[in-house]
Amino acid sequence: MATSTAAEPEPGRERPLRADARRNRERLLREARLAFAEHGTDASLEEVARRAGVGIGTLYRHFPNRHALMNAVFQEALHALLARSGELAEAEQPCAALVEWLRAVVGHAGEYRGLARELMSASHDTTSALSQCSTPLGSAGARLLERAQRSGAVRDDVSIGDLMQLTNAIALAAEECPGDRGLADRLLALTLRGLKP
């Protein structure tokens, strides 16, 4: 009986993509990023595949649903937000650090039309691939919030879940009023007044 000579991947690790599959995946991500920027997160996936020069089946082989594609597209921004939370974790003023980070989260959620809405829904659905973005963000924010609470600058009954929902709601409100550039900052400032003990 013949045995396979191909090395099996270790449990829990995926087999590396072939060069052509890797190129297809990179083209899909590039085109999805452009489509989301141009048309919002509800951009046509068929159009993304067409612009990447592949069939829709290839897109779904790499990304089984829209949230999986969105999660992959937003990984770079996610890593930047997580890195920023790490830098702010040692800031002299814990409340100012939390505020700066929340402002960055609002900015990220407002980058693509529809992203804030999708992040809000994913925060309640741990089976969504997009929760792979919202869960680490929540953990990073929780560390900054706890530090601000320990300093006495933020009320003890404030939760990171509530703050994340508020930041997404602020981004969604700003998305609906694109002519009012200061709206997100004003809403964030109003929210932050309610955090103080």
Image: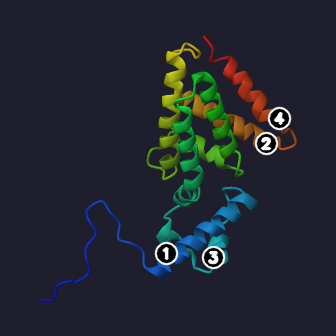
- The disc, 2 or 4, on the residue closer to the chain's N-terminal end is 2
**Mark 3 or mark 4: whose residue is earlier in sequence:** 3
Mark 3 → mark 4, Cα distance in angstroms: 36 Å
Q: Where is mark 3, residue-wise?
A: 52
- Residue at 73 percent of width and 22 percent of height: 190
Q: Please report whichever mark, 2 or 1, sits nearer to the chain's N-terminal start.
A: 1
Cα separation, mark 2 vs mark 1, equals: 37 Å
Mark 2, secondary structure of its residue: helix
Question: Which residue is found at the position 56% from the left and 33% from the top?
Answer: 88
Name which of mark 2 and mark 3 comes first in the sequence: 3
Q: CA distance from mark 4 to mark 1?
A: 41 Å
Front residue (pair 197, 80): 80
Residue at mark 4: 182
User: Pointer 1: what residue?
Assistant: 22
Task: Say left or right for 22 vs 35.
Answer: left
* In the foreground, 12 or 54: 12
Amino acid type for the residue under numbered disc 1: Arg
Amino acid bearing label 2: Glu
Q: Which residue lies most toward the top here? A: 197
Which element type, helix, strand or loop, lies under badge 1?
Answer: helix
Q: Dots 2 and 3: beta carbons under 8 Å? A: no
Neighbor class of circle 1 (other Cα within 10 Å; few <14, some 14-19, many 20+) is few
Q: Which residue is mark 2?
A: 176
Dots 1, 3 in contact, CB < 8 A: no
Asked whether the beta carbons under mark 2 and mark 4 sit within 8 Å of each other, the answer is no
Report the label total. 4
CB contact under 8 Å: marks 4 and 1: no
Q: Residues within 10 Å of mark 4 (few under 14, many from 20)?
A: few
Q: Residues within 10 Å of mark 2 (few under 14, many from 20)?
A: few
